[in-house]
Amino acid sequence: MSERTLSIIKPDGVARGLVGEIYRRFEASGLRIIGARMTRLDTQKARAFYQAHRQRPFYDDLVAYMTSGPIMAQVLEGDNAIQRNRELMGATNPAQAAVGTVRADYGESIERNVVHGSDGPGAAREEIDFFFRPDDLHSR
């Protein structure tokens, strides 16, 4: 089933020059990048994007990290895109991520784990709408 998901290469991934390598992995797995933009979240936008975590003890650190530099946001499309992207990313904690996943290869810690991906269809729709207008997306 073809679907869409949001992916973010976080500030540490952008700063370390990993955008091209991560894009190569998306495309090698059959995912198509149908929208992309580099942006820098301000505190208000980061708080809004991660509002589901506002009661968690790591929330303020997460907001500070996500506003520390530019991010690369992209929409991925393909068969089972949400699950496929989550498999490519690996476990949230890089120490527990499967060998060959983005987080196992490039994640430095549970807090600095290089990438974000939507965890389900509802989140994917909301997260895509947070960063992109419909006319920003181009299926191919």
Image (cartoon, grey):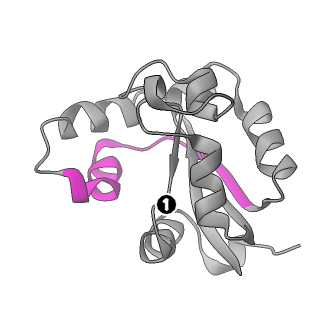
Residue 12 x/y as whole percent: 53, 24
Badge 1 marks a residue whose secondary structure is loop
On screen, residue 4 versus residue 53, left or right, reads: right
> Who is closer to the viewer here, 133 or 65?
65
Residue 48 belongs to the span the image colors magenta: yes
Residue 18 x/y as whole percent: 70, 27
**Quarter holding the N terminus?**
bottom right
- Residue that appears at 24% across and 59% down: 52
Q: Amino acid at mark 1?
A: Ser
- Residue that appears at 73% across and 37% down: 22
- Residue that appears at 81% across and 52% down: 29
**Quarter holding the C terminus?**
bottom right
In this rendering, the answer to whether 119 lies above or below 69 is: below
Residue 136 belongs to the span the image colors magenta: no
Graded by Cα atoms within 10 Å as few (under 14), some (14 to 19) or many (20 or more), the crowding at tag 1 reads many
On screen, residue 118 versus residue 65, left or right, reads: right
In this rendering, the answer to whether 108 lies above or below 62 is: above
> Who is closer to the viewer here, 43 or 120?
120
Residue 74 visible to an observer of this rendering: no
On screen, residue 79 versus residue 101, left or right, reads: right
Residue 44 x/y as whole percent: 28, 50
Residue 37 x/y as whole percent: 66, 51
In this rendering, the answer to whether 3 lies above or below 73 is: below
In this rendering, the answer to whether 50 lies above or below 23 is: below
Task: Name the residue carrying label 1.
Answer: 118
> Who is closer to the viewer here, 54 or 86?
86
> Who is closer to the viewer here, 79 or 128?
79
Tell me which corner region of the image, top left, top right, bottom left or bottom right, holds residue 64: top left
On screen, residue 133 versus residue 127, left or right, reads: right
- Magenta stretch in the rendered image: 35-53
- Residue that appears at 59% across and 42% down: 89
Residue 24 visible to an observer of this rendering: yes
